[in-house]
Amino acid sequence: MSVATTHDHHHDHHGPPRGWQRWVYSTNHKDIGTMYLFFALFMLFFGGAMAMYIRAELFMPGVQLASPDFYNNMVTDHALVMVFGMVMPAAAGMANWMIPMMIGAPDMALPRLNNLSFWLLPAAAILLMLSIVAPYIFPDGGTPVNTGWTLLPPLSVQNGIGMDFTIFAIHTLGVSSILASINIVTTILNMRAPGMTMMKMPLFVWAWFFTALLLIAVMPVLAGAVTMLLFDRHFGTSFFDAAGGGDPILFQHLFWFFGHPEVYVLLLPSIGVLGLVIPTFARKPLFGYKALVYGMGILAALGMVVWAHHQYTIGMSLVATNYFMIGTILISIPVGLMLMNFIFTMWRGSMTFETPMLFGIAIILMFSFAGVTGVMLAVVPADMQYHDTMFVVAHFHYALIPGAVFGLYAGVFYWLPKWTGHMYNERLGQIFFWWTTISFNLTFFPQHFSGLAGMPRRIVDYSIQYTEFNMISSIGGFLFGLSHLLFLFIIIQTIRGGAKAPAKPWEGSQIGTPGLEWTLPSPPPFHSFTEAPVIK
Amino acid sequence: MLPRRDKCLSALFITGVTCLFSSMAHAAYEYNLTPPASTLTQEIFDLHMLTTIVGTIIMALVTGMIIYALINFRHAKGAVPDQEFHNGWFGRWAWVLVPVIVLSIDLTIASSASSTLSSVESHDKADVTVKVIGSQWKWTYEYMDDDIKIVSNLKKLEPTDPLYLRDVDDPLVLPTGKRVRFLLTSSDVLHNWGIAEIVPKKINIPGYINETWTNITKEGTYRGQCYENCGTGHAFMPAVVRAVSPTEYEQWKVTRKAQQAQAAAEASADKVWAKAELMAKGEAVYTKNCLACHQANGQGLPGVFPALAGSKIANNSAALAEHIAIVVKGKAGTAMAAWGPQLNDLDIAAVVTYERNAWGNTAGELVQPKDIKAAR
């Protein structure tokens, strides 16, 4: 700590490096955070374009736009891009920007590692794009990656060269996530300003602490699983081939041992943002800060031991199935506790409804709804009917779009004045909120119905009984996609100018959250704290 | 500020109501789980309704609380924030109260679910046992107690037909009022044989056997689909069950066995078949089994499934033995399945003959059932 501070003093007169070197060689947490956020924004549109293709194909029965394999490839890569390319980098960008400023640190603990963990991402993105085009440009390219993001063997063993690129992309993304997580945990544990005890940290910092621990625990498992897949594909092993003594279900266990905690990796940072947004705009301290911290810890721990609820239909023993069912249903306790804490933070408060708060309220409502369908899905016999239908698709989009993506939007609008030094256009922000929220519900609510009626997921074509709901869904989807052009416009407009933002742009900021970021001017100087702030 | 928000809210309300009414007016909007037609799925359906109702009540409570807060605790109304709210008795005990309430709801659901789960996993003696084999992209049903085998393929219909993607050429036939056990497996990748009216799903895993069961209460035709992503043809794998009365079922079995015996006798006879006969039969076999990958024009899908028209093997007189070997034994490392165990000698002979003479191929040989018998 003291070493880092002295170091900063020493370099004070240099100012930021200029030109491309400022970004490529950057070790500054804010610049790297900015790059993460722009990378995520780019991937949002990349993954979003795939979603638009999917919704266009499903607009009516019949295969209209491309081959079934291309469709399945888009389904696969939409998920991979959104999860690894959009939500995680966006959350990591916010962590980079905000965590050092919130805990009074001069920078991340390991700034060069920080540079590496960012620059691995574009490399991974290129590998992922190659996985899409490779089957078409190589003479014997084989089938595109048509497995869905779960990459289940034996289908993934049948795939062509695109699958190998996907595997390497996942390895690269995994290395990036693990390095970033190590950096975040180290920063939180070692770089806090004097007096900033763990239980004084803003909720966002706690959320990222648990997220990073989860990532360090589960990313290697995914890396192992896809490596085994690579060996099965090319080196004659039979980890997942029953004919050679392997077990196709082993991959599912490994995948979901990573995949379920990953859900909380996506959700927790947004819960952290909510823990700042709701008290700010309710002008009242967070209700149950400790309960929320412990709740997130319990959520992370429980999330590690219920993975097989994604595989109720594989034929487990009665005891195992009962265990996974009850474990999963129990997750509703910490989640319920969190939602209760946010509702009671608003209770007896004095609310205003700026864009971040609007998103906050929408998240509470829609995420509760995802929780309710989550309990329905946790119930094994019923899940055997819901399994792999559009009902599941609707459920996890209700969990991940409000739970993760809207949380990120709330964060972007909440911190945009701090990041850029300009206030965003509040009117446009509110239009963006209503536009996305309404079109989101229009897109995904009907999918509950088509799913219950039996429409499978990951199908390129469906029978005519599902036409109406799919049409509504597609129209909603196009509107939802279109709304993001407004989002892009608001961001560009705010970066280029607008009303000057004060150090504390929100009247209620600092209430109940001890974040030090508001003590800095907007935008903060290149080196945030030249002297360690002291918390009393 | 305020009027505009009200406008937005009313717009939202109108959209919602419109959606609701349009769904009432239109019979095609199926919005709940398919009505059950077996004892077990009835139990599951009841469980589904229980969780749905509990969930709806919880959502109504949460929504109600939020709306109450939004109306009463707004800055614009001059609400004063209660900075000590979290320090009151409620603040100190809410973190115990809420989990206890949630836990009790959870346990209610879990206990009910657990007993249904035991019914799903019960292994009582079955009256009929059917092995359901998934493969790319069709279902094969084998009656374990009778020598009956059904291969169920998608029936090609126009996208305007009410049964588009919902009908097969040869459905599974089952008796009502009997306990039927399904043994599920697969010959290539993961599949999932799912018909929500009559069975809880278990996936079909190559090399493993899963079990599920039914006791159908109503006669009728039940339609489902493959629910596990199995590649290119995943959307084109309907599963259809025709449930008939036990007497009708016994009659059907007799007729079916007679048909099968006749076909088997024909296939194994040492008869030498004429080209026209082989071509006609071959086209039928090709359409049923090979068309999904290699396409009607024999061009395959470039980069995915090889073309047969003008191919190095099918259009080359020297490669006849290789051609037969690939059809009988499959090709390792590709999606090409071994057809030897699935088709009889006559079928294979006919389809090989067809492939070597159709789409402008000029290899020209006539393959007879005895050639296939020799190659096995």
Image (tube, grey):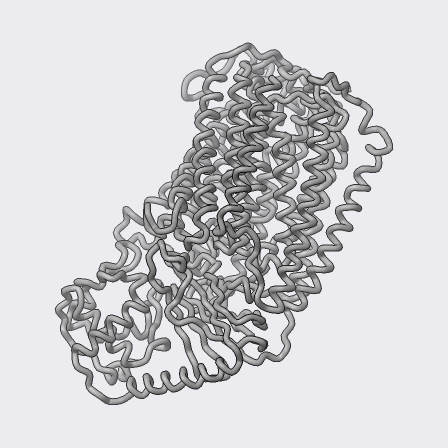
- Hey, which residue is sitting farthest right in the picture? B89
Say whether residue A264 is left or right of residue B95.
left
Q: Nearer the viewer, residue B74 or B337?
A: B74
Image height of B152 relative to A422, above or below: below
**Total label count?**
0
| Residue A113 image point, x, y percent | 53, 32
| Residue B237 image point, x, y percent | 41, 62
| Residue at point 47%, 27% (across, down) | A38
| Residue at point 59%, 79% (across, down) | B126
Q: Which corner quadrant of the image does residue B287 belong to?
A: bottom left
Say whether residue A89 is left or right of residue A60.
right
Say whether residue A105 is left or right of residue A57.
right
* Residue A123 visible in image: no
In which quadrant is the C terminus of chain B drawn?
bottom left
Image height of B210 relative to B107, above or below: below
Q: Nearer the viewer, residue A58 or B111?
A: A58
Image height of A357 relative to A164, above or below: above
| Residue at point 54%, 60% (across, down) | A250
* Residue B6 visible in image: yes
| Residue A258 image point, x, y percent | 57, 49
Q: Nearer the viewer, residue A302 or B30?
A: B30
| Residue at point 21%, 69% (across, down) | B355
In which quadrant is the N terminus of chain B drawn?
top right
- Hey, which residue is sitting farthest front in the picture? B25
Q: Which corner quadrant of the image does residue A19 belong to?
A: top left
| Residue B264 image point, x, y percent | 33, 85
Image height of A231 relative to A195, above or below: below
